[in-house]
Image: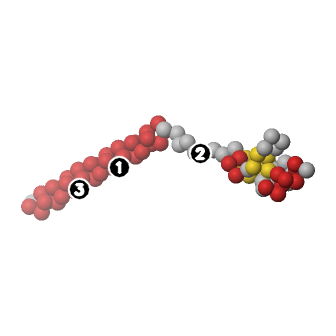
Amino acid sequence: MKYLLIFGLTIAVIWLWQGKRRSALTEKTRQQKSKAQGRPRQLPTTEIVACDVCAVHLPRTEALTNGRGVYCSEAHRRQAEG
């Protein structure tokens, strides 16, 4: 009888421990999903332009510009000017 009581108590403790563990994992998952859905991730964007001489595409921040167009290098800018 004593061993049956010890076995029953052991099973009850394990059952309670597993229940708390499952509940904590469920709550953690729910919080992570609400964080991900509540705030969309914004990625930085860069405008891409094409060189007027060779048509190579490059970010606008790296391009050379003047009143006539957009160029990928100083040589192409000079070539376009004349």
Give the CA distance from mark 1 to mark 3. 16 Å
Q: Quadrant of the N terminus?
A: bottom left
Give the CA distance from mark 2 to mark 3. 49 Å
Front residue of this view, candidates 37 and 67: 67
Give the CA distance from mark 1 to mark 2. 33 Å
Which residue type does callout 2 highlight?
Pro
Local secondary structure at mark 3: helix
Q: In this rendering, does residue 61 appear at all?
A: yes
* Disc 1: which residue: 25
Is 60 displayed left or right of 36 in the figure? Answer: right
Is 40 displayed left or right of 13 in the figure? Answer: right
Label 1, residues with CA under 10 Å away: few <14, some 14-19, many ≥20: few
On the image, the x and y values in percent for residue 58 come to 74, 52
Rendered image: mark on residue 44: 2
Q: How many marks?
A: 3
Mark 2 vs mark 3: in front: 2
Front residue of this view, candidates 33 and 79: 79
The figure's colour scheme reads: secondary structure
Front residue of this view, candidates 45 and 77: 77
On the image, the x and y values in percent for residue 16 come to 23, 50
Precedes in sequence: disc 1 or disc 2: 1
- Name the residue located 12 percent from the left edge and 63 percent from the top edge: 3
Which residue type does callout 3 highlight?
Ile
